[in-house]
């Protein structure tokens, strides 16, 4: 049976049209930023980590900037606006302020304002609190226009934010990559750092605890907060009191308590295969090392517990590669 030429023409036009839509980035207007605006801290501003958004909304990335701060230091409204949130998220104090079309967020903060309050630029909205994800006290400052993350440094006098527009091919590749990494993180017994092409890296990290992987680095429904969010590490199931060892040689940069992560230990491993690597051990019963101490690979550093936002005894391991959170199973042996 012969296909009518008109039908062939219609199908061809539709396919070409779909290809053009998928392959061409849509035009986007520059966000309407508040003016005047300022940095949220007084004095010289030092960025510990810059803005590094993910290509797809649910992937790992750094959706704001980290500013060096002191505990108790006043946090100031970056512009005139209305407080839309003042409370705790994942154990950390958070304040959000709406400035017309965009919203700024500040954490960890002890709030000094209430939801609905009108604030003026430079007005104190809280103070820097403990529990940051930095290795030292810091303020994580974010800027959003609806669901789009922007670089908040623009409010402090930087360049206007550049929107990241993806072609259809780039977006499809990013989605495939995110899906693949999620599948890898959820599968137990995979080799260390396979990447997307199966390349191994000889960094010789060891598993920090004897126990199976019970939850991987992926999006999930938080068992305590009951919200859909990124699970930012790998959970190993183990009885309370099980020894925890250092995954690699390094230096203890922090030992602290966070309402979310419980008893927390941060190790800096320096340059590993050309990148700076840091690990974090969370929810422990206790640790037996101190800040500034050098530890060797496999050395006892603490014992498994269930402190902080935890539903049972386990170790939550986190890994940073050049300051960005990555899947810990990339770095661990089978």
Image (tube, rainbow, N blue to C red):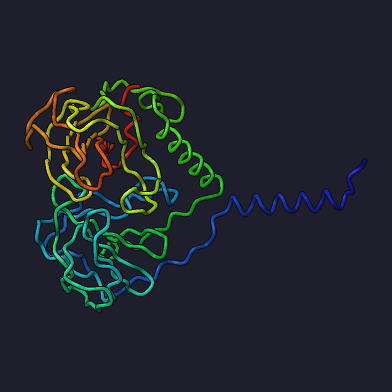
Query: Is 150 displayed left or right of 125 in the figure?
Result: right
Image coordinates for residue 334, horizontal then vertical, percent: 35, 21
Q: Residue at x 27, y 21 (%)?
A: 204
Q: Residue at x 21, y 75 (%)?
A: 121
Query: Is 99 displayed left or right of 209 in the figure?
Result: right
Along the line of sight, which residue is nearer the eye, 322 or 73? 73
Q: Is residue 89 above or below residue 99?
A: above
Q: Residue at x 35, y 25 (%)?
A: 192
Along the line of sight, which residue is nearer the eye, 299 or 260? 260
Q: Quadrant of the N terminus?
A: top right
| Quarter of image, res 319 | top left
Q: Is residue 90 above or below residue 120?
A: above
Image coordinates for residue 321, horizontal then vertical, percent: 28, 37
Q: Is residue 217 above or below residue 165?
A: above
Q: Residue at x 6, y 35 (%)?
A: 290
Q: For the image shown, how many numbered marks are present on the structure?
A: 0
Residue found at the far right of this picture: 1
Image coordinates for residue 317, horizontal then vertical, percent: 26, 36
Image coordinates for residue 136, horizontal then vertical, percent: 13, 47
Along the line of sight, which residue is nearer the eye, 177 or 31? 177
């Amino acid at each position: 049976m012969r296909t009518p030429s008109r039908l062939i023409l219609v199908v061809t036009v539709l396919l070409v049209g779909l290809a053009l839509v998928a392959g061409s980035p849509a035009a986007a207007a520059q966000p309407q930023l508040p003016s005047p605006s300022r940095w949220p801290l007084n004095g010289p501003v030092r960025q510990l980590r810059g803005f590094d958004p993910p290509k797809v909304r649910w992937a790992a990335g750094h959706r704001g900037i980290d500013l060096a701060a002191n505990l108790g230091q006043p946090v100031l409204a970056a512009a005139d606006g209305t407080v839309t949130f003042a409370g705790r998220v994942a154990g950390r104090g958070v304040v959000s302020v709406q400035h017309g079309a965009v919203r700024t967020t500040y954490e960890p903060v002890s709030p000094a304002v209430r939801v609905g309050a009108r604030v003026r630029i430079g007005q104190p909205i809280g103070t820097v609190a403990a529990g940051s994800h930095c290795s030292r006290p810091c303020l994580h400052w974010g800027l959003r226009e609806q669901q789009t993350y922007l670089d908040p440094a623009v409010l402090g006098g930087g360049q206007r934010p550049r929107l990241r527009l993806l072609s259809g091919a780039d977006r499809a590749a990013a989605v495939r990559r995110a899906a693949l990494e999620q599948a890898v993180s959820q599968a137990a017994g995979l080799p260390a750092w396979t990447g997307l092409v199966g390349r191994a890296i000889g960094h010789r990290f060891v598993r920090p605890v004897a126990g199976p992987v019970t939850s991987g680095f992926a999006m999930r429904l938080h068992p305590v907060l009951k919200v859909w969010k990124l699970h930012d590490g790998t959970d190993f199931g183990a009885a309370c009191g099980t020894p925890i060892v250092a995954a690699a040689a390094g230096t203890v940069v922090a030992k602290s308590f966070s309402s979310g992560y419980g008893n927390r230990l941060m190790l800096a491993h320096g340059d590993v295969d050309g990148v700076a690597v840091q690990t974090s051990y969370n929810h422990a019963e206790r640790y037996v090392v101190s800040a500034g101490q050098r530890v060797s690979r496999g050395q006892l550093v603490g014992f498994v517990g269930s402190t902080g936002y935890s539903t049972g005894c386990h170790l939550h391991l986190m890994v940073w590669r050049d300051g960005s959170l990555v899947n810990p199973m990339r770095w661990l042996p089978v």
